[in-house]
Image (cartoon, helix red, strand yellow):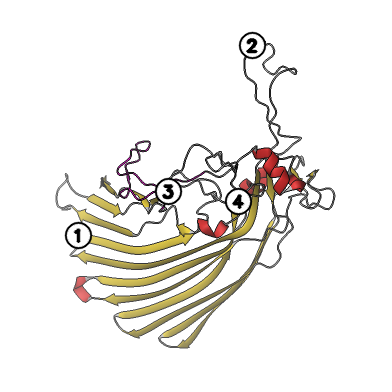
Amino acid sequence: MCIRDSFYFEDDWHILRKLTLNLGVRYEYNTPMTDARNQMYTLDLKTGQIVQVGSDGVSLSGIKPDYNNIAPRLGIAWNPSRNLVIRSGYGMYYDSGMFTVNSAQYFNPPIFNLSVYFPSAAGLLTLQNPFPSNAGYTPPAGLSVLNPNLPTSYIQQWNLTVQRGLGAWGNFTASYAGTKGTKLARPFDLNQPLPGSGDLQTRRAEQNPLYGAYGNIFFIDDGGNSSFNSLQLLYNRTMGTRYSIWAAYTYSHSIDDASAFLGLQQDPNFPQDSHDLDANRGNSGFDMRHRVVAAFVVQLPKGNIWTRNMQFRGIVSAGTGQPLTPIISSDNSNTGNTGGSSAGTDRPNICLLYTSLSGLGVAFPKSRPPDEVGGTWTLKPAVIIGGSVQSAQK
């Protein structure tokens, strides 16, 4: 359950005949998500004990509310000449909240418990008794925990656009757009031991006695940051009454330390080393450096019954490949990097040339020396072509 309240003020100020200033401010308050049946549990970071949300000083959502969501807005439009318009703007935008984040607290004891059962010579598992009480193995509980002081994530966006009319040759637009994400939700393993030999759970207890009885602790914090910068070019032209074309090109670069809250196909979005989160900063999993889109519309002659009110439309989209994070299926570091959605994965330091990966069409760089960390791995570029015929006979 969530309650959302927002208020805003906006005003246009015509400073000069050709200069307009837009001012605004918005306040948002979204109550953290709660469960009407109150079945979420979390970890008390001070005592190391599992507690139910809504008790022992823990809020019903597991996190404290954030009342500081004031978002200013600013826009400027200038028309210095007949065929030239310059626009610029800035805005701050707060996240509305995801129940996916809070719902991680469902996967904690006593609501969620994991046991592993294997058939053996001493007895087989049966449908009548698939979980025998005298068999099976219960590993140390893996927890999902939120920082109780988790604030609301927000982004800042800004842009500068110059649009020029070219008369009969159409219109051309050039823009710079940037985005900065701050306090983004970012998971890591709060109970990850340092690399080493020996029993994993014993080393956990030695290095962090308060949480030594637990396995991986999927901890959600607010340390994520992102940045995006782009050059955007747009050209469109109407040729007579029957033809029009539209073409756009974007050069952009997106960098972050967590491209999404959960893993993507090309990136698990979980740090390899939870003791060095800054090492996870790099190209975003969705980063596409170059992208071109072109479209056209052809209006067929209206003078006969066969082609009147009929159009041909087409679109072509092409872009460079997106980054890929390679992973190793085994825990070579002996740090609990077993993969999945709640643990990290080890990463290789040698890249092989043109290794196949699940049919994704992956292009890898050449092999590198064993002591050198692998370079950038990317998916192959993609080209998408589409079209349609539209007819509206009357």
Q: Residues within 10 Å of mark 4 (few under 14, many from 20)?
A: many
Give the label on residue 349, or none: 3
- The alpha-carbon separation of the residues under discs 2 and 3 comes to 43 Å
The mark nearer the N terminus, 4 or 1, is 4
Whether residue 359 is in magenta: the answer is yes
Circle 1 sits on which residue?
Answer: 243
The magenta span reads 346-371
**Depicted 73 relative to depicted 279: above or below:** below
Q: Which of the two marks, 3 or 4, is nearer to us in this view?
A: 3
The amino acid type found where label 3 is placed reads Asn
Residue 32 lies left or right of residue 84; in this view the side is right
Viewer-closest of 108 and 117? 117
Q: Which of the two marks, 3 or 1, is nearer to us in this view?
A: 3
Q: Residue 18 is drawn in which quadrant?
A: bottom left
Q: Residues within 10 Å of mark 3 (few under 14, many from 20)?
A: some
- The alpha-carbon separation of the residues under discs 4 and 2 comes to 39 Å
Viewer-closest of 212 and 11? 212
Whole-percent x, y for residue 132 in the image: 72, 16
The amino acid type found where label 1 is placed reads Tyr
**Depicted 255 relative to depicted 312: above or below:** below
Circle 4 sits on which residue?
Answer: 187
Whole-percent x, y for residue 65 in the image: 73, 59
Give the label on residue 124, or none: 2
**Depicted 276 relative to depicted 344: above or below:** below
Residue 290 lies left or right of residue 373; in this view the side is left
The amino acid type found where label 2 is placed reads Leu
Residue pictured at 20% horizontal, 62% vertical:
241
- The alpha-carbon separation of the residues under discs 4 and 1 comes to 51 Å
- The alpha-carbon separation of the residues under discs 2 and 1 comes to 73 Å
Q: Residues within 10 Å of mark 1 (few under 14, many from 20)?
A: some
- The alpha-carbon separation of the residues under discs 3 and 1 comes to 53 Å
Q: Contact (CB < 8 A) between labels 4 and 2?
A: no
